[in-house]
Image (spheres, rainbow, N blue to C red):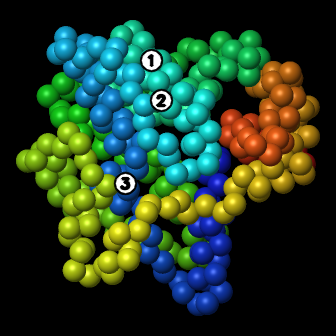
Amino acid sequence: DDPIADISGVSYYAVMRAAREQGVPVMLMGQGGDELFWGYSWVRAALEASQRKSELRNGSGVGLADYLKISKPPYSYTMGLLWLKSLGGLLSGYRQYHSDLVSPADRVVFYDSDHSFQTASHNIHGMYTKHFNDQVLDSDPTATFTRHDPSTPLDITILRLICETYLRENGIAQGDRLSMAASVELRLPLVDYRLAEIVIGLHKAHPVTKPQHKKWLQEAVREIVPPFIMSRRKRGFSPPWRSWIKALGEAYGHQLVDGYLVQHGVLHADAARDQRRRLLPPPWAGPDLIAWRSLVLENWCRQMGGKT
C-alpha cells in the first residue's frame, strides 16, 4: 500500500474507467514489454555503464577519456534541460567515473545513475530532520544493485533488477490498483512466467552487450503488427504533467509547510518550505519531481494517518 507518484497513473485510471463505462470487464496491458525487451533507454544505458565499470575495475584499458563523451540531446524537454545542465553529458560522465572508482566492484550501475536518485542522495542531509536522517543513513539503497554471482552475465543481472524493482513495484502494482479501482480485471500477458523463461534462456544462449530497443519482440510480431506502430518513436503514457504538477502545487503545496511530514519529524521545516516553492517553478524550468513526490507522500500520510 505504499504510495506511487508516477503521474502516468492518471492515464491508466482514465482508460480503465472508460473501459468499465463501456461494459468492458477485462483489459490487457503491455507491462513487461519494456522491462524484458530493453524498451527503456536508461536501462540500456545502465548495462553499457555497468560493462564500462567492470572494465575500469578490471584494468582492461578503460579510463577517464571513455567517460567524457558528449551524448545526443534527448527528445524530452525535461531531459533536455538536464542534458544542458550536465554539459551534454560531460559532467555526469566525470561524476560516474569517480563513482565507479570508489563504489564496490560487485555493484552494477543501475537506478543510482538516474537524475532524481542522485538529486535525492545529494540533498538527503538538508531534506530530513536529524532523527529521521540518522535512520535513513543506516541503510544503503544501492546495495540492491549488487551482482551476487559474478558468473551471471551483466545483461541478465540488469534484467533481474528492472523486473524486481520498477516492473513489480511500479508497473504491476499501479496497474493492479487502478484497474481494480474501476472494477476491471487486468491481464498482463507479457509477464507470463513462460515468456520470461524463454527470454532469459535466449539471453543465456546469446548474451547481449548492446541491446536494441525491443528487437526480439519486434521480430516476433512483425508479421501481425502494422508497420506504423513498429516504426514510430517511443512515447510515454502521461498527461500534461508539467502543468498538472504546477496546478497541484498551487492548490495543495501549502500542505507541505507544516503538514504531516514536518509534524512527525520526517521533513525538515525549511526543506518543506523550499519544496513548496519548487512546485511553482518559473516558466523556463520544469517542476521539481522530488517536491512532487513529497506532496504525494504528504497526502498519503494524511489519509493513512487520519488527518484531513
From the image, tell me which residue sits under label 3: 39
Residue 136 lies left or right of residue 89; in this view the side is right
Task: Name the residue nearer the viewer: 131 or 62.
Answer: 62
Task: Name the residue nearer the viewer: 215 or 92.
Answer: 92
Marked residue nearer the N-terminal end (2 or 3): 3
| Residue density around tag 2, few if under 14, some if 14–19, many if 20 or more, within 10 Å | many
1 vs 3, front mark: 1
From the image, tell me which residue sits under label 1: 94
| Residue density around tag 3, few if under 14, some if 14–19, many if 20 or more, within 10 Å | some
Residue lying at the far bottom in this picture: please name it. Answer: 23
Task: Name the residue nearer the viewer: 280 or 191.
Answer: 280
Q: Quadrant of residue 34?
A: bottom left
Residue 83 lies left or right of residue 167; in this view the side is right
| Residue density around tag 1, few if under 14, some if 14–19, many if 20 or more, within 10 Å | some
Residue in view at x 39 percent, y 27 percent = 69
**What residue type is disc 3 on?**
Gly
Determine whether 175 is above or below 289 in the image.
Answer: below
Q: Is residue 292 visible?
A: no
Inter-mark Cα distance, 1 to 3? 26 Å
**What residue type is disc 2 on?**
Gly
Marked residue nearer the N-terminal end (1 or 2): 2
Residue 186 in the image, given as x and y percentages of width and height: 48, 72
Residue 188 in the image, given as x and y percentages of width and height: 40, 67
Q: Quadrant of residue 287?
A: top right
Residue 100 lies left or right of residue 255; in this view the side is left
